[in-house]
Amino acid sequence: MNEQTEVKQSLKLFIVLSRAYKALNEEINKHIAEKGLNPTEFAVLELLYHKGDQPLQKIGGKILLASGSITYVVDKLEKKKLINRVACPKDRRVTYAQISESGKALIDDIFPAHEQRIHELMSVLSIEEKDQAIELLKNVGLSIKDLSY
């Protein structure tokens, strides 16, 4: 295969991957919106639910959100009484986000259907194809970290 063909194939892969991600995201976000949350709010709640209390400063990196937006999202979740801010006893500069009991109840309600819907959408692939896709996409992501422009 010549280089021009490889370049076109790379562009095609990028477009197909982008469209697949967009279609999956739109479908998953419908369910989240039905529960009165936007995708970012859900991501923060899901992180706290599964990983426990998190420093506010670290949440953005874990859910791929700009740090400036975290305060806004945390404020909204706090107003909905879904999370609490908790001061770090060892370092006054650090504040943790902690999921509240009503936040846990909401995720307990939402997450099983969310997980099932993702499974349904991915069921077009066999377990072997999923494993292969995971490895291939992981390779792409990890290789980008190694590039320096």
Image (cartoon, grey):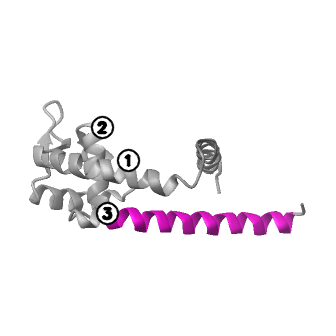
Residue 134 covered by magenta stretch: no
Which residue does the numbered mark 3 point to in the structure image?
A: 31
Front in this rendered view, residue 70 or 80: 80
In the picture, the quarter occupied by the N terminus is bottom right
Front in this rendered view, residue 70 or 131: 131
Which residue does the numbered mark 2 point to in the structure image?
A: 51
Given this view, does label 2 or label 3 mark the residue nearer the observer? 3
Which residue does the numbered mark 1 point to in the structure image?
A: 62
Q: Name the spot of residue 10 as percent of width and height, x first.
A: 72, 63
Q: Pointers 2 and 1 in contact (CB under 8 A)?
A: yes
88 vs 60, left or right, is left
Quadrant of residue 26 within the rendered picture: bottom left
Near mark 1 (Cα within 10 A), the count class, few <14, some 14-19 or many ≥20, is: few
Residue 20 covered by magenta stretch: yes
**Residue type highlighted by circle 3:** His
Q: In this rendering, is residue 3 above or below 130?
A: below
Q: Secondary structure at mark 1?
A: helix
Q: Residue at x 38, y 50 (%)?
A: 116
Q: Residue at x 22, y 45 (%)?
A: 108
Q: CA distance from mark 3 to mark 1?
A: 22 Å
Q: Residue at x 16, y 30 (%)?
A: 90
Which portion, as a residue range, is magenta? 3-31
First of labels 2, 3 by sequence position: 3
Q: Secondary structure at mark 3?
A: helix
Q: In this rendering, is residue 16 above or below 105?
A: below
